[in-house]
Amino acid sequence: MNKREFHEQGILIAEAALPYLLRRAGEWREAEGHNGGVVIFYGAEVAGWMDKLRDPQHWCPGCLAVTKFGGVWRAHGGDDHSGARQWVEVMPEQELDAQGVCDD
């Protein structure tokens, strides 16, 4: 496992998890007929979809939101009962190739 991690305001996501999230989000969008929006993950499972990133209070802290263009946001603050307080960017959107892989 690659030890490099993304650090943003104290948030850690193992780099090895990012290709899985991007691939799984793309598969889910295709299966459900959603071309855009954000796919929300709770752990490694898809928890839902939104047309745009909003309403963090509807999600538990730690949920991840993945945009069509590879941006990753994390629900931050709050608690499981009241929901998160905000979305914090973990990885900015990037150009993706036809397979959904970031061009680096």
Image (cartoon, helix red, strand yellow):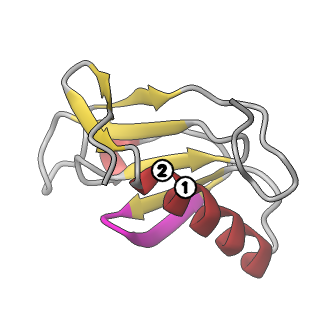
User: For this rendering, which residue is in front, 70 or 59?
Assistant: 70
Secondary element at tag 2: helix
Which residue is tagged 2?
A: 18
Which numbered disc covers residue 33? none
Residue 92 place in picture, x, y as percent: 57, 26
Under mark 2, the amino acid is Leu
- The furthest residue to the right: 98
Are the two marked residues, 2 and 1, in contact with CB atoms closer than 8 angstroms? yes
Position of 29 relative to 102 (above/below): below
**Going 48% across and 50% down the picture, which residue do you hit?**
18
Label 1 packing within 10 angstroms: few (<14), some (14-19), many (20+): some
Marker count (numbered): 2
Quadrant holding the C terminus: top right
Span of residues in magenta: 42-49
Q: Is residue 48 magenta?
A: yes
Mark 2 to mark 1: distance in Å? 4 Å
Which residue is tagged 1?
A: 19
Secondary element at tag 1: helix
**Going 40% across and 53% down the picture, which residue do you hit?**
16
Q: Quadrant of residue 78?
A: top left
**Going 79% across and 73% down the picture, which residue do you hit?**
30
Q: Main secondary structure of the magenta part?
A: strand
